[in-house]
Image (tube, rainbow, N blue to C red):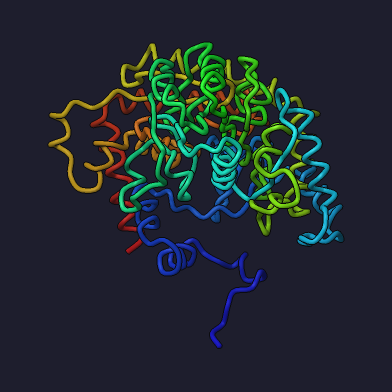
Amino acid sequence: MKKMYTISDLPQLTRAQVRENFKNHMNPGLCTYLGLLDFDKYYVKAQGVNVWDSDGNCYLDFLGGYGSLNLGHNHPYVIESMQKVAARPNLLQASMNGVASALAYNLAQITPGKLSNTFFCNSGAEAVEGALKLARIATGRSRILSCEAGFHGKTMGALSVTGRKKYHKGFEPMLPHCDVVPYGELAALEEQLKKNDVAAFIVEPIQGEGGVIVPPAGYLNAAKELCHRYGALFVVDEIQTGLGRTGKMFACDHEGVEPDVMCLAKSLGGGIMPIGAFITTEEIWNAAYGGVEKCLLHTSTFGGNTWATAAGIAALEVIQTENLPQRAAELGDYLLSGLRSLQEKYPIIHEVRGKGLLVGVEFEQPAKGIMAKLAGAINKLASEYLGSMVAGVLLNEYRIITAYTLNNPNVIRLEPPLVVSREQIDVVLNALDETFHKNRSLLGFSLTSGKTFLSSMLRKK
C-alpha cells in the first residue's frame, strides 16, 4: 500500500507539494488559473482578519470567505463551544438532536416576521434546493422566478435559478419552468406573476456575485406584495447578506421585509463548520411537510449535526454580543466614503456601491483598441477580468486578499470579516490609492499583471 499523508505530515507540506497535489488529484485547470497571477499561495495560519503563508508573510483578508467569515478566522469562542459538545453523538438520525433544536429556536427569535420552522443542511446551495422544493410542494405550482445576474449556487436546482448563462453551458437542460426577470424591475416581475403559475420568486436583497448591486428603495417590499397578490412565495436568499454583513442582522431588515422563506448558510457556521438552512412559517411548513406521511420527504444525512449546529449557536451569540451588525454599518460607511473619495481621483473607477461591509468597486470597461496590444492569457484577463488584475496587484504588492464577483468579473469585492478595524480599512484604502496612482489605466494593470504572470511561470519551472 502506498504511503498516505497523516495529520502529522501537514506542517512539512511545501507550497510546491500542495500545488502538485492540487494539479494531479483535484482541479488542474483551477491550479493553472490561480497560478497566472500568483494566487496559488499556501496559507498555513489564520486569526481574525489576518492569514499567514508558508513563508511567514501576513495578509489582510478582505475577501472573508465570500461572506462566510463574518466572525473572522478561527473565532476562539466558536471553537470552544464546539469542544463543549464533543462527547455528544454527532450523527444519530433516529432521534431529535437537542443542539439542532436549540439553534432552530434561536433562529426563530431573530429572523423577521413569522419565520419559525427551520430545516438544516450543509451549504447555501442545499438551502436553495430545499427552498425550491418547499415552494413547489406547498403551492402545488412548478414555476420558479429568479433574477438576471443573480447567484444561488451551482447544484442543479440552484444553478437553474442562477442568472448567468456561462454556468449553465454544458449542463443543459436546466430544471424546467425556471425563468429570470431583471433585478429591481417590478413591472417585469408582475408580468410573469400574472400567469398565476409561479410557486416562488427567489431573490437576493443585494446581489453579491452580480457585482454588489443594491436594488431601488422599496423594491423588496413591493416584490413581496406582488408575490402574495398572485399566490407565489417570496423567498429571500440571505446566504451572503445575512447575519450582520450589511449593517442589519439580515439585509431584508433594512426595509422591514418579512419573507415567506429565508435561506441562510456561510457565516451561520461561525467560519468553522459548513451549515446551511432554510426557514419558513409554520403555515407553509405544514402545507409542505406537515403530518407523519410527509415529514420525511426532504431529509439530509449530515444536516443538523451536533458540531455544525453548536457552531451556529455560538456564531449567533458572538454576532449579538459583539454587536457585529452595528460594526458593519459604521465601518461600511467609513469604507464606502474612502472608496468614493478615490473614485473622484481616478477615472478608472466607474462606480462604488454596497451596504455595510459588502462593497463592490466596478471599473471602467477598456477601449477596444487597447485589447489588440495585449496577448495570450493576459489578453483574456484584460477583456473580462480587470477585477482579477486589480486583485492580483493588491495580493502580490500589498498582501491584501480580494477577488472579483462571479457574475460581474469587472468588479472587485471588499468583504472583510466584521471584526475588521478602522486601521485595517485604512491599509486597504492606502493600498488602493497607490495602486490606482501607479496603474491609471487598463494597460498599466495589464503590464503589471504580465510581469507577475511571467515571474510566476518562471519560478514554477
**Can residue 256 be seen?**
yes
Q: Give the x, y percent position of residue 195.
A: 41, 26
For the C terminus, which image quadrant?
A: bottom left
Observer-nearest of 393 and 115: 115
Q: Give the x, y percent position of residue 253.
A: 65, 19
Q: Hey, which quadrant is residue 300 in on the image?
A: bottom right
Identified at 71% across, 52% down, the residue is 293
**Can residue 60 be seen?**
no
Observer-nearest of 186 and 28: 186
Observer-nearest of 132 and 37: 132
Observer-nearest of 266 and 345: 266
Identified at 74% across, 54% down, the residue is 305
Q: Give the x, y percent position of residue 178.
A: 41, 38
User: Does residue 426 appear left or right of residue 375 in this picture?
Assistant: right
User: Does residue 378 appear left or right of residue 277 in this picture?
Assistant: left
User: Does residue 269 appear left or right of residue 406 in this picture?
Assistant: right
Q: How many numbered badges does the structure rendering display? A: 0
For the N terminus, which image quadrant?
A: bottom right
Q: Decide: is 141 above or below 87.
A: above
Q: Decide: is 415 above or below 364.
A: below
Identified at 48% across, 44% down, the residue is 158
Identified at 79% across, 47% down, the residue is 100
Q: Decide: is 376 above or below 321.
A: below
Q: Hey, which quadrant is residue 263 in on the image?
A: top right
Q: Hey, which quadrant is residue 410 in on the image?
A: top left
Q: Give the x, y percent position of residue 68.
A: 61, 40
Q: Residue furthest bottom?
A: 1
